[in-house]
């Protein structure tokens, strides 16, 4: 039994030059901050790379909960907490713009009966 996908999986390797230790902080209300600390293969802190911060929250909409994930450009956990509200606002605004653009693109497509969905129609 020779499965090509299984063979590809054996080629997977951990990128030992891009390791991070992940810690999660939450206020148990609406804010979750992931702190990714760069580490060396032995688990020690890699001081040559910056710690990364990512926020996660959910916006309640009429259609249900909408998860938002976003990077927070901060130098410390305290700064990430202070910047969290503005980062949520920015991520939500970007999501709304992306949705508007997707809707504009969807509305501008020409639909020709009998054409498979996703096909491109070439106009002379």
Image (cartoon, helix red, strand yellow):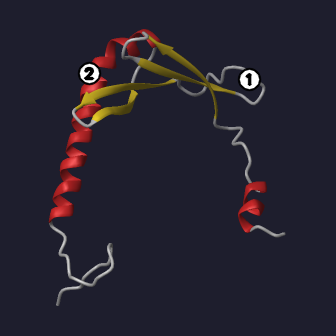
22 or 117: nearer the eye? Answer: 117
35 on left or right of 122: right
Disc 1: which residue: 43
Disc 2: which residue: 86
Q: Is residue 52 above or below residue 95?
A: above
Residue depicted at 24% across the width and 26% down the height: 89
19 on left or right of 112: right
Between the C-alphas of marks 2 and 1, the distance is 33 Å
Residue depicted at 43% across the width and 11% down the height: 28
Q: Is the Cβ of the residue at disc 2 closer than 8 Å to that at disc 1?
A: no
Task: Find residue 106 and report its horizontal and vertical position in percent.
Answer: 21, 62
Task: Find residue 113 and report its horizontal and vertical position in percent.
Answer: 22, 82
Q: Secondary structure at mark 2?
A: helix
69 on left or right of 50: left
Residue depicted at 32% across the width and 74% down the height: 117
Task: Find residue 66 and report its horizontal and vertical position in percent.
Answer: 32, 34
**Quarter occupied by the N terminus:** bottom right
Quadrant in the rendering for residue 124: bottom left
Q: Secondary structure at mark 1?
A: loop
């Amino acid at each position: 039994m020779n499965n090509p996908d299984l063979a590809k999986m054996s080629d997977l390797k951990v990128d030992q030059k891009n390791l991070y230790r992940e810690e999660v902080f939450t206020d148990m209300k609406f804010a979750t901050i992931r702190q990714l600390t760069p580490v060396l293969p032995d688990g020690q802190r890699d001081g040559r790379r910056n710690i990364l911060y990512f926020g996660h929250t959910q916006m309640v909409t009429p259609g249900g909960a909408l998860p938002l994930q976003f990077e927070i450009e901060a130098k410390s956990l305290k700064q990430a907490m202070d910047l969290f509200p503005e980062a949520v606002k920015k991520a939500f605004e970007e999501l709304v713009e992306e949705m508007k653009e997707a809707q504009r693109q969807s509305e501008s497509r020409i639909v020709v009966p009998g054409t498979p969905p996703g096909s491109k129609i070439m106009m002379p």
